Image (cartoon, helix red, strand yellow):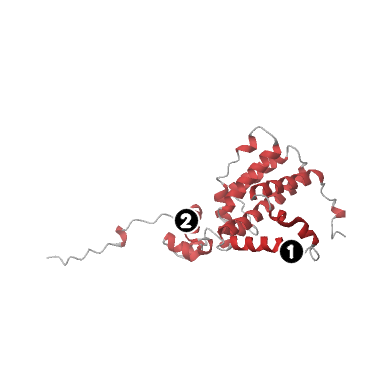
Amino acid sequence: MTSGKPAPISRRERPAKPALTREGIVEAALEVMRAEGLGRVTMRRLAQQLDTGAASLYVYVRNTAELHALMLDELLAGLDLSPVTAEGNWRDRLVTVLWSYVRVLTEHPELAQSALVTRPSGPGYLNLVDGLLALLDAGVSADRASWAVDLLLHFATSTAAEQGTRQRAIDAGEEEDRLAETIASTSAARYPHIAALGLDLLSGPGPDRLTWGFNVLISGILQTPRPAPDTAPGSA
């Protein structure tokens, strides 16, 4: 007669866990981020997700900063870079690619904030940079292009981090209303320039302002040569 209790399972009979890989760790990190937020993406949480020990993860990922960079690179692998080889004005195509980058980061504002200080170096990021350089090559000298790509990506990253965070903030609408009220009631005697422009300071939908910002930068890049080494601020 049996007791009705399930028979114990030998450790040898349990299915083997999938082997740890860097790709698997990144995939698990993205799953946790989407479900719980980037703040929950810790080595301990990933170890739980992957049914392993936290120490095992450090064989594949040095620290959280590197993990964030790998996560961003994985997201960048999905960017649409077809405008790089398409027909049409190179400036318009450049802005289109930059917009694709902004959209990815806006969907993950916490990761965008991390990207301000931690840069990926995988194929997703390298494909993006190479595509931007190819577009800049149509109208910008090589020495300016090498600095321009960093400037454009920094502007795009910081904008995505700011806008993505604002969109998810619970009191974002109230803050905007308070700012609008403050500007509308500003004293012309004390703040004449703010009062003169008024709510035009806050005008224009986000996409128009961002596109304008990209075009301002591109125009400046075209008109501004790199400084000679001996004339740079701080040079001896």
- Assign the N terminus to one quadrant of the image: bottom left
Q: Residue 94: image x %, image y %? A: 67, 41
Residue at the spot 49% in from the left edge and 56% down from the top edge: 34
In the drawing, does residue 15 fall left or right of residue 186? left
- Assign the C terminus to one quadrant of the image: bottom right
- Is the residue 81 above or below the residue 113 in the image? above
Res. 184 in view:
yes
Identify the residue position indicated by label 2 in the image. Answer: 31
- Is the residue 159 above or below the residue 134 in the image? below
Q: Residue 174: image x %, image y %? A: 60, 63
Looking at the rendering, which quadrant does residue 118 occupy?
bottom right
The image's mark for residue 186 is: 1
- Mark pair 1, 2: CA separation: 47 Å
Q: Secondary structure at mark 1?
A: loop
Q: Residue 223: image x %, image y %? A: 81, 44
Residue situated in front as seen by the camera: 193 or 10:
193
Q: Secondary structure at mark 2?
A: helix
Residue situated in front as seen by the camera: 9 or 120:
120
